[in-house]
Amino acid sequence: MGKVVGFGDMLVRLSPPGYQRFLQAASFDVNYTGAEANVLVGLSNNGIDTEFVTRLPDNAISACAVSMLKRFSVGTSHIAYGGNRLGVFYCEKGASQRPSKIVYDRKNTAISEAKPTDFNWDNIFQGADWFHFTGITPALGEHLPQVVEEACQKAHAAGITISCDLNYRSALWSEEKAQSVMKNLMQYVDILIGNEEDACKVLGAVPGNTDVNSGKLDYSGYVSIAEQLINTYHFKKVAFSLRESISASDNNWSAMLFSDGKCFQSKKYSIHLIDRVGGGDSFAAGLIYGLMKAFDPQTVIEYATAAACLKQTMEMDFNLSTEDEIFRLMGGDSSGRIQR
């Protein structure tokens, strides 16, 4: 089936129990997460060989994070160690008309201080077929754009497929800085993943008539943006997730894949959200899985969309759905009836 290498950050997630607000919380639920790590867990859970590359402080908290990855069969043998701290984010889950809130504490983390000498990409890519990163990683530190580019150069030279989820984070860098870095990295990318807003802010693509606050989507705008991006950067495929936010508790969810000059659109799911964090990562994992399994384009986008739908019904960031469960949802079994 091949091997997927992911490079990125690992964080501690601290969440008030249930739907409590930060002000109410007397304790926090603890989880270990990160965009690329979430993707790899989703893949490993369905039998794909994976390897997570990052830089962590050599302490007991990092050991907990690594243990969590190992629990889900994600490879950890190429993690670099150094620095003093692991990043943290606090997540207050919203409900109905009250939005969720996330507060980041990720300055001066081990990964933010990473340098090119921390990683031997020739060794890391031994036996690899796929390399995945997000737009979060190069935003984390002074040397990270160079580190990511060196990884992409090595992967490209080795004939490894490269995917990137744009994942713009305004708390990490400005649109101008993001564009100056990410436009350069796009020359190495085969599979681009994102949404209309990310494509606009990270790559300067001209948006359609989507209003992310109203939840209304202009599908023709996505086609236009995909065509712009493919013509400019020569991606093999572009995939967009399409989220219509009715409230913090209920979203409509679908996606589109642009491949070989054609647009493939998934069915739409109405999701009553349990935890939407990690939904985009599970979409990326489903897309990578479908492409590695050589599904036809329509099946690829249906699989990725259904996988992400199921994740958003689960607590915390990892998608623990199996291939059988995902195909069952794709086939129309969405009643949620108890299975005995």
Image (tube, rainbow, N blue to C red):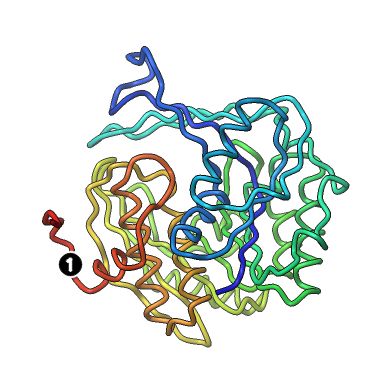
Q: Secondary structure at mark 1?
A: loop
As drawn, is 257 to the left or to the right of 105? left
Front residue of 122/18: it is 122
Indicate the position of residue 99 as horizontal and vertical percent values: 33, 34
Q: Give the residue drawn at x 62%, y 47%.
A: 136
**Residue 203 lies in what quarter of the image?**
bottom right
Query: Is residue 28 depicted above or below 210 in this figure?
Result: above
As drawn, is 48 to the left or to the right of 313? right
Q: Give the residue drawn at x 52%, y 55%.
A: 39
Indicate the position of residue 170 as horizontal and vertical percent values: 58, 40
Q: Amino acid at mark 1?
A: Asp
**Residue 276 lies in what quarter of the image?**
top left
Front residue of 181/58: it is 58
Q: Give the residue drawn at x 50%, y 53%.
A: 41
Mark 1: few, some, or many residues within 10 Å (few <14, many ≥20)?
A: few
According to the image, label 1 marks what residue?
A: 333
Indicate the position of residue 89 as horizontal and vertical percent values: 52, 30
Q: Give the residue drawn at x 80%, y 60%.
A: 123
